[in-house]
Amino acid sequence: MPASPATVTRAAADIGGTFTDVAVLTPDGRLATRKLPSTPENYSDAVIKGVRSLLEELGSPPGALEELLHGCTVATNAILEGKGAPTALLTTRGFRDVLELRRVRVPNLYEPLYERPPPLVPRQLRFEIGERTGPRGEVLLPLDETGVRAAAERIRAAGIGAVAVCYLHSFANPDHERRTGEILREMLPGAFISLSVDVLPQKLEYERTSTTVINAYVGPPVEHYVRSMVSQVEGAGIGGRLMVMQSSGGILDADAVVANPARIVECGPAAGVIGAQHFAARAGFDNLITLDMGGTTAKASLIEAGRVLFADEYEVGGGMSSRSALMGGGGYALKLPVIDISEVGAGGGSIAWLDKAGSLKVGPESAGAVPGPACYDTGNDEPTVTDANVVLGYLNPEALAGGTVPVRAGRAHEAVASRLAEPLGRGVVETAFGIHTVANANMMKAVKAVTTYRGRDPRDFTLVAFGGSGGVHAVDLARVLQVRRVVLPVAAGVFSALGLLFSNLEMNETVPFLHLADEAPLDEAERRYAALADRIAAVVGGPREEIRFTRHADARFAGQAYELTVPFGGGGEPGANGPGSKAGRGAGMRDAVAAGGPADGRLDAQAVAELCARFEAEHLARYGHAFSGEFPVEIVNLRLVGTRRPAGIIEPAPFDPASRTGPDARRGVCFGPASGLVDTPVIGRGRLGPEPRTGPFVIEEYEGTCVIPPDCTAHLDRLGNVIIELPAAG
């Protein structure tokens, strides 16, 4: 039945590799969603179609929309596919090969012939400039402006449209980089110029260079994408400003994103984690493993004590985006605020194939939205995870997304049989179950990167599954992890779009401040925090009194090369983030918002003592040891986070089971290689109640599907979330 008219002021659109998800909450809290195939030839088409369709259904004029919140993968895909802008690098003489040298670290310890991905800037486009600044900002060698102009001439002749500039110790004195930027903008009008003093004014030469290069490399495609999206949305008569999710989980307007595009490299997965954090607070869950399985990739993250965890260092483009020190060295360093998310190429559209030894593999290549899985019958003959799930009876054999995506089950059977089952000499159902199992094994890598590789036991957590395919794989994955509870939130299939609706305006800024903690000039720290607050307020906008500032510092033991981020000043007990309390293990920037204190609170000796205690406790939790009393604590950077909660955030209305009664059918479903296809009920979420229902059954709804095996039970909580209980491990 059509909903009564309601003026919507905030809509969210999340573009995935296969589907584009759109969600809105009406003023009275009603949730409306759309799931459409993505349109890679012009991603705006699916966004505009979905938003207009929802607004028309709700009787809301498109021009009344005040904000369109957006998550995308354009920056990530530019890196993964090697389709960023051709980029040049200007650096201090003697540091031309920093991008080649990287860190002495490889992701595969027992693969001596492992080859890292090539640098984003080839050597012939890396130019050495005569200049030198000391670590305290003293000029040791003046800038060779003639050399800068000569490099600019060569860059122009090569037709390069993006330039990164990273000089040694420029974070201590930005003058040389600023002047270089002026010359480049004069000689290369229209080029995207990225200065390290704007992107990452911190120590660590490789990380700073790599991050600045990434910013330049993705700059032109991000700018083109964002400007085009704004233009097309306005042309379609949809009002409001475009707000884009950052990798840190906050949103910023289009202009701020274009100015610093590296901030959105991991923005796609971030929205789902923010949605999970909001869900955890409402549903009463403290510790969650998030599993976001879409059409192209699967992402995992942690919510610990209700807090999102952040990465101290991150890598992209190495086959699996991750921050784990145990799996690093395979990608490009990105040292910007990033939610700790591990991502692997295992989604519904991931192609299953046989290697030269005849072993079954899944991904990372994906059929994407076009042509899509074989069962879509749009030109692909390769079997995918979605095709396997159709064969196994997990997915509707006729249509997906409420009938918007027709499915031909016969094409799925044919693809699995001809490409895999027959060469392997096995049955079609058995082979499909093998695809399903291998996909789960691939996803296990992402989950381990945020749990066991960080000293966390998955058994201490609840698995929350979302994304179009999350509910299909979650229970089997939880069984291997020995996780006892799986949760499928309302609108799980469009959960990242829903997460966008709960996101805050947020900006994170950093300034170097190298001092032993006990000797730090606190008056100078106050002045630097005040300057950061001014910069953040200018970007976030709105009344300054509505911005909540929280202070943090990057600290280390003297002599170390890597830092941990901990709160600096304000509330919170010393050691509250220590290993003795699950409430604080691994606390990062967003984790510490409640403990960070306002920006105008004075720093004093007590604040320094609390900083040291928090750092030592976090070091013990993270690495299993600390040098307390043996080495002094050193502050490396000051970090300030400014957050403003938009007025348009609306809480969902109470769950109405009648709105999600769904199907009442049966079909054959496989729950193991020996079981064959078992006649199984297919129901809607609203058919469940507070009393546990024993499997097997399949929950099928517009946004996605969830499979409940025979030995599990499921019920609804007060918010309409599906709570799945697994049996204890034998």
Image: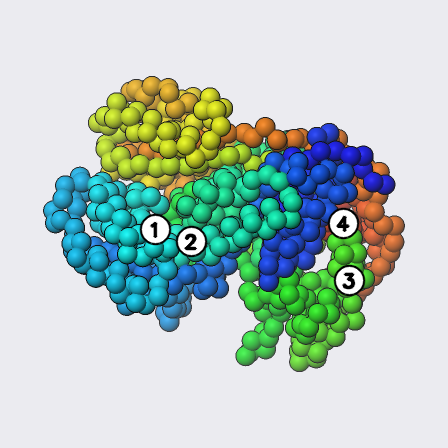
Residue type beneath disc 1: Ser
Left or right of 50, for residue 307: left
- Distance from disc 2 to disc 3, alpha carbons, whole Å, reads 37 Å
Which of the two discs, 2 and 3, labels the residue nearer the N terminus? 2
Residue type beneath disc 3: Pro
Q: Nearer the viewer, mark 2 or mark 3?
A: 2
- Distance from disc 3 to disc 4, alpha carbons, whole Å, reads 13 Å
* Mark 4, secondary structure of its residue: loop
In this view, 145 is above or below 437: above
What sort of colour scheme is used for the picture?
rainbow
**Mark 3 residue crowding within 10 angstroms, few (<14) / some (14–19) / many (20+):** some
Q: Which residue is mark 3?
A: 406
Quick one: 653 or 218, which is closer to the camera?
218
Q: Quadrant of residue 213?
A: bottom left
**Mark 1 residue crowding within 10 angstroms, few (<14) / some (14–19) / many (20+):** many
Q: Which residue is mark 2?
A: 219
Residue at 22%, 49% in the rendered image: 168
Which of the two discs, 1 and 4, labels the residue nearer the N terminus? 1
- Distance from disc 1 to disc 4, alpha carbons, whole Å, reads 43 Å
Q: Nearer the viewer, mark 1 or mark 4?
A: 1
